Amino acid sequence: MSRRVVRQSKFRHVFGQAAKADQAYEDIRVSKVTWDSSFCAVNPKFLAIIVEAGGGGAFIVLPLAKTGRVDKNHPLVTGHTAPVLDIDWCPHNDNVIASASDDTTIMVWQIPDYTPMRNITEPIITLEGHSKRVGILCWHPTARNVLLSAGSDNVIIIWNVGTGEVLLSLDDMHPDIIHSVCWNSNGSLLATTCKDKTLRIIDPRKGQVVANNFEEPVALQEMDTSNGVLLPFYDPDSSIIYLCGKGDSSIRYFEITDEPPFVHYLNTFSSKEPQRGMGFMPKRGLDVSKCEIARFYKLHERKCEPIVMTVPRKSDLFQDDLYPDTPGPEPALEADEWLSGQDAEPVLISLRDGYVPPKHRELRVTKPNILDVRPPSGPRRSQSAQDSPLSQQHTLERLLEEIKALREQVQAQDQRITALENMLCELVDGTD
């Protein structure tokens, strides 16, 4: 008589649970744009959701603790002239988020710790380089201010957000629309999927595809979903992959191991309503006192609902085996170090005493001297025309006019900030 051997794993009994009604975010007009991104991004401070907006594109940013009904006049982040298609929080600064749009631009925003009184309309920087819509954003996991974007022009651009410069442009890697892009753990390689049904592993600094013929899959799993897009979220600390079908109503999760059969089905969390999108909290934003190993933010048509994944444990002590040291908010490299060929693993932190997000940190953009930049590519002018004293004089006059206009704009903004700060002080004094 044979006995069935049950595979031993501390994650066999992971269960999902939707948050109580008062912990959801209600009355949010989630975007109805037909795009394959998750429409939601979350970090230990904020929840950001792409929303419906007339005459352009917008997303809303809510402090994580601001649950319940969202005021219809809550300020939005607006600035794009067409729908926002993707958003991504910077892993090294919880107050910085990037947005990509149908208007071909990427904008990077500084979100204050306090709730602003008006819409945020001025990005820190606008990145222009794509010729068609930009639908994918992904920050580098270990290098400061390095951001990847991919557009419907089949081009991947890697930016230094701190200077606004293009570090790398990969424009001959994909013959068709790019569906998804992600970095490996130290940011040395990219994995991409494309409409040509090919998965590529790319070394971006060499500009080479290092692997794209994977022959046979190591495991094949049938997914009972509609023909909607799958949103995968991988947690390297627990080796669990969560698969959320966009338009589906379930989250399936699997444990990945080094031995055959490699992929082990754990369970399925199901609910009644389909998800319009899904946000995934970084490990440092979880409640370790409740053995929470993952938290999702599920978008409905008019609300966002947290879903918590927990390992049942009786002890109230910190569970070392569930929480190995995990990537923290400090970058391991500067942008120029990464570009020169250096690699570094993420700087890890312990979650033993919980994680407290650092206070507001500003992202400072230092643009290179415009006089040192060559004219943009286009119809080539003769060398004599470019270098003539008259041409240089015109350029200098134009720059001086721009500097004057910018100074006036800065002064006006300073006056506005001072007035707003005075209003804020009066309001605070009035509530004391």
Image (cartoon, rainbow, N blue to C red):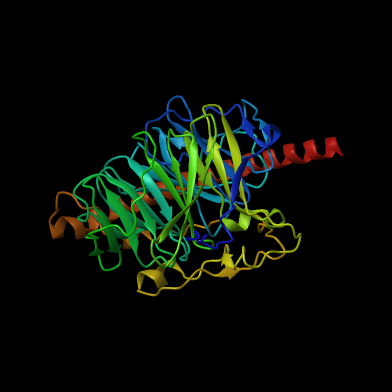
The outermost residue toward the front is: 1
Q: Nearer the viewer, residue 313 or 23?
A: 313
Percent of width and height locating residue 224: 39, 38
Q: Quadrant of the C terminus?
A: top right
Q: Is residue 348 above or below residue 268?
A: below
Left or right: 313 in relation to 136: right
Percent of width and height locating residue 95: 58, 51
How many dots with numbers? 0
The outermost residue toward the left is: 382
Left or right: 139 in relation to 116: left
Residue 58 seen in this snapshot = yes
Q: Is residue 186 above or below residue 163?
A: below
Q: Is residue 31 above or below residue 367?
A: above
Which residue does the image show at 29% across and 54% down from the upper left? 393
Please identify the quarter of the rendering in which residue 12 is found: bottom right
Percent of width and height locating residue 133: 31, 39
